[in-house]
Amino acid sequence: MTKLSADMSKTDLMHYWFDEVWGKGNLNVINEMFGPQATATGVVSSHSLRRADMHELVQAIRALAVDIKVEFSHTMEQGDWLAVRTLIYAKRADNGAPVTINGQLFVHFDGTQIVESFSLFDFVALFEQLGQMPLDTLPVCLTGQKLDWT
């Protein structure tokens, strides 16, 4: 197991974050790497997430999807910033069916701590694959139709 180190590149730090927090559910790494005043913008459109919110988000997603693995298709480091395009593979917690989504993330680091992040993940695709939204959600919404839950 890799240990967190100040010598790690920003890309390696992000791999560590995804492996430990999302892959293994190690919530202690949130406290270790997500700064006390850090904010994550974009995950939930209505507000920025803080450290406690990150704990809740990870637990909520990991209750829906298991065996989460994150790969990077593109990365760019510039000073204290990292830009990364993610490919996320998981399985539905209820039936083991495969789930695949992608996302983009911009992360500002201070040493090994995340101080702010901006992200955009394909949550529509996630919820479609989890069976929580119809598979044609985006095309239906683009026609102007509404999705109604009964």
Image: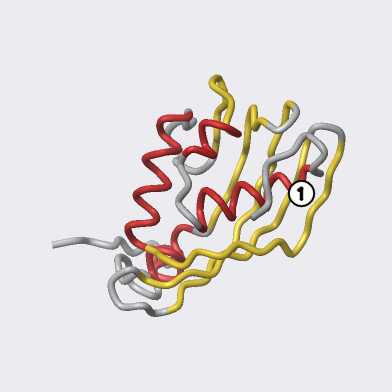
Q: Is residue 117 left or right of residue 112?
A: left
Q: Residues within 10 Å of mark 1 (few under 14, many from 20)?
A: some
Q: Is residue 38 above or below residue 68?
A: above
Name the spot of residue 102 as percent of width and height, x first. Answer: 59, 63
Q: Is residue 72 left or right of residue 77?
A: left
Name the spot of residue 65 as percent of width and height, x first. Answer: 39, 64
Residue at 55% over, 54% down:
121
Query: Which residue is tagged 1?
Result: 11
Residue at 75% over, 49% down:
12
Residue at 56% over, 65% down:
69
Residue at 76% over, 49% down:
11
Q: Is residue 38 left or right of residue 75?
A: left
All told, the count of numbered labels is 1
Place residue 115 in its image quadrant: top right
Q: Secondary structure at mark 1?
A: helix
Considering every residue shown, the one lying at the far left of the view is 150
Work out whether residue 100 or residue 24 is closer to the camera in this orientation and state it: 24
Work out which quarter of the rendered image holds the C terminus and state it: bottom left
Place residue 129 in its image quadrant: bottom left
